[in-house]
Amino acid sequence: MQFASDNTSGVHPKLMEALAKANEGYAPAYAGDRWTAELTERLRDMFQAPDALIYPMTSGTGTNAALLAAMSPPWGILYCHKSAHIEVDERNSVPFYSGGAKLKPLPGVGSRLDPEELRQAVIADSAKDDIHASPPVGVSITNLTEFGELYRPADIAALADAGRLPLHLDGARFANAIAASGTSPWEMTRELSALSLGATKTGAMAAEAAVIFDPSLKQAFESQRMRGGHNLSKARYVSAQMLAWLEDDLWLELATQANAMGARLAKGIKEIGGELAYKVDGNLVFARLPRAAHLKAKAKGAAYHLWGTGTALTGDPEEPLLARFVASWSTTEADVDALLAALSD
Amino acid sequence: MQFASDNTSGVHPKLMEALAKANEGYAPAYAGDRWTAELTERLRDMFQAPDALIYPMTSGTGTNAALLAAMSPPWGILYCHKSAHIEVDERNSVPFYSGGAKLKPLPGVGSRLDPEELRQAVIADSAKDDIHASPPVGVSITNLTEFGELYRPADIAALADAGRLPLHLDGARFANAIAASGTSPWEMTRELSALSLGATKTGAMAAEAAVIFDPSLKQAFESQRMRGGHNLSKARYVSAQMLAWLEDDLWLELATQANAMGARLAKGIKEIGGELAYKVDGNLVFARLPRAAHLKAKAKGAAYHLWGTGTALTGDPEEPLLARFVASWSTTEADVDALLAALSD
Amino acid sequence: MQFASDNTSGVHPKLMEALAKANEGYAPAYAGDRWTAELTERLRDMFQAPDALIYPMTSGTGTNAALLAAMSPPWGILYCHKSAHIEVDERNSVPFYSGGAKLKPLPGVGSRLDPEELRQAVIADSAKDDIHASPPVGVSITNLTEFGELYRPADIAALADAGRLPLHLDGARFANAIAASGTSPWEMTRELSALSLGATKTGAMAAEAAVIFDPSLKQAFESQRMRGGHNLSKARYVSAQMLAWLEDDLWLELATQANAMGARLAKGIKEIGGELAYKVDGNLVFARLPRAAHLKAKAKGAAYHLWGTGTALTGDPEEPLLARFVASWSTTEADVDALLAALSD
Amino acid sequence: MQFASDNTSGVHPKLMEALAKANEGYAPAYAGDRWTAELTERLRDMFQAPDALIYPMTSGTGTNAALLAAMSPPWGILYCHKSAHIEVDERNSVPFYSGGAKLKPLPGVGSRLDPEELRQAVIADSAKDDIHASPPVGVSITNLTEFGELYRPADIAALADAGRLPLHLDGARFANAIAASGTSPWEMTRELSALSLGATKTGAMAAEAAVIFDPSLKQAFESQRMRGGHNLSKARYVSAQMLAWLEDDLWLELATQANAMGARLAKGIKEIGGELAYKVDGNLVFARLPRAAHLKAKAKGAAYHLWGTGTALTGDPEEPLLARFVASWSTTEADVDALLAALSD
């Protein structure tokens, strides 16, 4: 009953096979290898972006920080949702990489940015056109969000229109977002300047790609990546994984499974009287359940996180606590049913 | 009719005299002079803090940034009001000096921090006690606030109690706050780890003092001050100004005059139908007046700032715009009355 | 004839097997897994350091930068050899991570630091005990050096004695150094505060370990690692590789092979009239050979780097150019002999 | 007998007068005042640079750091002499402001950069045109140097030609350099991208100007200045001082006096058997004198610094120690003669 995170699951066998195949002989270091070249072509096609720049990476945080630092001078403002990973889970990595840029977290609606709120924030921050003030320079969104909600292409277009600023997308769960939306990677990314494309949470070992659509970011990004320690020498092993991941749409197959398990879990939780805290668009389920339910489930070995403040299991057994359950590509119906049983027995 | 800022006024004659007197012969550089030694004694007495460290400075922004960077590691969270100068007017100086620390702006009540909101924010940010999260490390308040409101000692004590974090006070208008509160400098600062004590806006040339109550900040502050370019060689000229400013409570006399002119202006604005946007505790008056009033006043040469977004003077003449009027130590009753006449004629 | 770098070679089959074995079921993220726990015990034993802290990493640059930033305040001086990777190959990563610390490169003797020179530098930089100056705070050495030379334990002790400063060792080729020296890992590290232990260049995929001997570095290092994007979620795959690498001294076997091929190549180069630019202690061979030799070898597909300025192959065919040849764990005698033949035919 | 530094002397009476005159009524803040406008015109004329940008500043360190940070990305290399103030006396301010740029100190000849050495360094650092390496981006020189030597315009042109990089000049003693060279400010600056023009050491209170010749530096410099805390509110008081300083070539008169006293002192020291360590081109005299001489002079109250390591006055009385003597605009012949007497009695 492993629902702690999608990064506790293993690597899909086809990616392991790809690693084994890529492990033949010598290959030029620092992304000069043929797997990276092929990945570049593959992603350019997928995103219909013949000039996109592709960089194999091992870290989502490193990818986000290096891309956003390339998009902002040290004195800029970057907008994000208040729950964004870059805001709450990366220990100030964006001001670090950028040398001082400010993340401005917005409350949004649910876990998503609200275009009108973004518009007002940009207008307000632009009003004082003065060297004292920090200028708005970009927006970062997460899709699926940290609470599992989906932005559709129209939502992203609305944010682009509202902010009139370059957009970055943290795609740690990009596969889940594409699978959930039924749209194409191209539709989902056409408004973006840069994308952090994560495979790690969807069946890879430690494989991400930085995708740059705005070529003016090239020099700054490559410099940030290098000095951050993210210019991987044996890049072939990341690129080979990502190629296998994309092959025959394996990535979408894995994300579809994770999403389906999220939906099954959400349905089951409602049936046992739990309350969903956010819309369940993919593989993340945030639910309020009585303390007593958690006590039972934890006693039976269910692994997942309680969320927010006041998460002690002591207290009124009927008082609900917020929990996060994450399904992954390897979650089975039996896993979900066992969790539900543990929570409700 | 100069109400643009209290930094458009000149230097009080007694400070000019002090400069002339200090300009005799040689003096050791870098605060090794006797004026700085005397200032240190004077301020230690005033704050009843025999171990306080005192540094003459020329910049409020530099003082704030170097103090806050000494209070926070690069991965910390410092709380402030969303209108704080450090948040909106210093072009990301705090993340710059600290190497990445996050200012977390809170909405507060009016322009002041709300203790309960602060408490909740600290609890929420402390909940995830994990290397991913940024730990709360301090609070910065401004007194008078950017919108002219006063914190009394009890208000500061409530914030100290709510946040249980080291406190910094941006005292660019500390004189106005003391004059407005009728309390002593000691009462106002007893909860503080550090104070930016500003004289520039109250009659000095470019004279501030960094006051450190928590001696553990010494090494980091001195290093930040040095590398920031704020270790003044001819420090005697700042210290001599501040001594004259403190002498016979001149500083409070000047602030009292500025505050009285603020009160006179506030009263007059209400009489001509304007609406005050914030409580007027000192020398800052934020008021909503019809566009037509501003057109008239500007035409007559009144100098002050319109505030926020949508400040164009074109549009419905009856629709009010927010204006900021700042009285200074040299503002006279005639100045105030002339402004009121210009706004209402 | 692949002698471009030891990071162009593949992953040793035993490490691939270990990856496959580690890929079973779920494991806690962020180094909470059992492989990392076992690696910690294994390395503590090996270094006879029961309190050492061990962190699986994927990047040598990231490991170096995060460790050195934990060792230095933003205003410190860290000494290194002028050829150190951190000085010439990491795009200013140390001043970046540390927020401004200065790497002070010393000429040394060959590619190694000279204790007397270090002593003098530290004395000179300590002489001005003043806030203007930057204080000496640490020393970083590389073993094997960037030019393939070895520090023996006595050499490191001499540097520790000369500098009286905390020591960091960049061990990207630590295995080669141990194999070359015949000493134990404990002897080689007993003077260190921190070690970057690299396996990537000696048969791993992207696997390093940060080893902290001085526990006071813990909090700063963990924070730097996190905000740098180096807190790996699926850490088990790095730790499992390193365990297999250490198992039955495979690491030393691989390094011994690489070193032996370095020696064979060095001997061969002298026999064909080349001149060695540095002592060949391990797997790196720097040699001066006539341009004509390089033209022939390159034409036959030999892969290696010409070094320094003026490396154009046009020019006087007899004039020697400096070349770097790197042998790896997978280099064979036949590879070396083919290269020598290509250079001399 | 005050020879500790030219920043221990006072402010010239004409500058005090100018301050008093500028202290009339209100003036727009942040360099919007008429004194700053006039200073801009005055300096543009003087440098024959109609598009130069002029910023009143209070700190030489702040001016240097903000200008150099505008000239370099965080991953650049800036060359300077190993004795440069930015290298040894500003506590890592350049890597701080720039977010990581590397100062590369060169040994030079005496205290000046050597064009050929610079050329070789730039060639070597450019040789590895690779993302790992840090690219050369600029050169900073000091005139007079920290050891009192002069660059003439032809020397600067030779450095510009050798490095083919943008040049910054730290002109903390620019007046002394112009007075010593007999050339015009235009001739001295025609190769520069930016100049830190210091008046503080030559009779001002705390008055510098950042002079930008390359307009592409504008936005980055203004941002660095702001976030560094160097965007002065009451700028009129700096600009008024500088105008008085430039008026009727007072600045050159003061520097000429300081230089003459330096020459008189140098001559006298040789006559009493001392040895000059550097060429005395201006107001700085570095001399080796027996310990016994220093003991006598110190006992008589002479104020100056012993330099470098091993400056204890105990030891062999005949063994010479290096001393730095600084003459200022207010140094008199009697002062020099008294010092010489104290050293030789």
Image (cartoon, coloured by chain):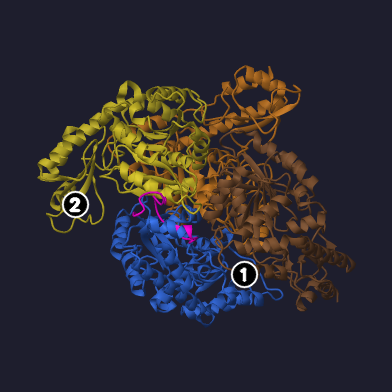
Chain colours: A brown, B orange, C blue, D yellow
Instruction: Tell me the quarter of the image containing the C terminus of chain A.
Output: bottom right
Q: Is residue D173 magenta?
A: no
**Would residue A148 be found to the left or right of residue A226 on screen?**
right
C211 to C120, vertically: above or below: below
Residue A191 x/y as whole percent: 72, 44
The N terminus of chain A appears in which quarter of the rendering?
bottom right
C308 within the magenta span: yes
Q: What secondary structure is the magenta-colored segment mainly? A: loop
Q: Magenta region: which residues?
A: C299-319
Residue found at x 66% / y 78%: C21
What residue is at 71 percent from the left and 23 percent from the top?
B291
Secondary structure beneath dot 2 equals strand
Image side of residue B2 versus residue D139, left or right: right
Q: Nearer the viewer, residue B122 or A7?
A: A7
Residue at 72 percent across and 62 percent down: it is A245
Residue D344 tag number: none
Chain identifier of the residue bearing label 1 in the image: C
Residue C279 sits in quarter: bottom left
Q: Position of residue B126 (x, y in %)?
A: 64, 61
Please determine if labels 1 and 2 lie on a single subunit: no
Residue B286 visible to the viewer = yes
> What amino acid type is highlighted by mark number 2?
Leu
**Compared with residue D252, is residue A287 higher up or lower down, i.e. above or below?**
below
Work out which residue is located at the far bottom of the displayed protein and give it. C248
Query: What residue is disc 2 on?
Result: D321
Mark 1 highlights which residue? C235
Q: Marks 1/2: CA distance?
A: 58 Å
Residue B24 rendering spot, x and y as whole percentages: 29, 34
